[in-house]
Image (tube, rainbow, N blue to C red):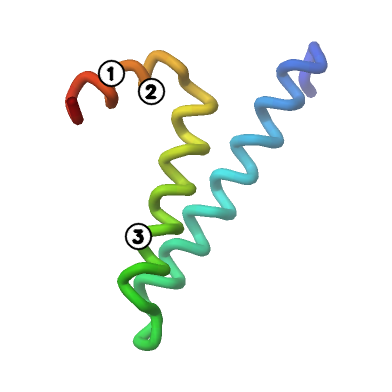
Amino acid sequence: MCSTRGDRAGTAEVGELGHAIDELARLVKAEDAGEEEVAAHLARVWAMVTDLDPELARRVARYTS
């Protein structure tokens, strides 16, 4: 059980991230999935991860600069 509203929101976001990763895995396995569709979905997953962890977002920006 979550103790604060923020904790519950974080749990929901992690659940959404899990679903997005599952969907990405499905797309990668699908023979008819286009490269652009997979890339767009992967970008969405990364955006969700960096929303959950701003420090990670800061580090990623450093590596991609």
Amino acid at circle 3:
Ala
**Residue contact at pointers 3 and 2, CB within 8 angstroms:** no
Looking at the rendering, which quadrant does residue 12 occupy? top right
Q: Which residue is mark 2?
A: 57
Picture quarter with the N terminus: top right
For the residues labelled 3 and 2, the Cα–Cα distance comes to 18 Å
Q: Which residue is mark 1?
A: 59
Which residue in the rendered view is the most extreme toward the front? 65
**21 w.r.t. 5: above or below:** below
Q: Is residue 27 left or right of residue 63?
A: right
Residue 8: % across, % down: 76, 25
Mark nearer the N terminus (3 vs 1): 3
Q: Which residue is mark 3?
A: 39
**Residue contact at pointers 2 and 1, CB within 8 angstroms:** yes
Residue 9: % across, % down: 73, 26
Looking at the rendering, which quadrant does residue 33 occupy? bottom left
Q: Residue at x 74, y 16 (%)?
A: 6
Residue 62: % across, % down: 22, 19
For the residues labelled 2 and 1, the Cα–Cα distance comes to 5 Å
Amino acid at circle 2:
Ala
Residue 14: % across, % down: 59, 36
Q: Residue at x 50, y 60 (%)?
A: 22
Q: Residue at x 54, y 54 (%)?
A: 20
Q: Secondary structure at mark 2?
A: helix
Q: Secondary structure at mark 1?
A: helix
- Please tell me which residue lies in front, 36 or 52: 36
**26 w.r.t. 63: above or below:** below
**63 w.r.t. 58: above or below:** below
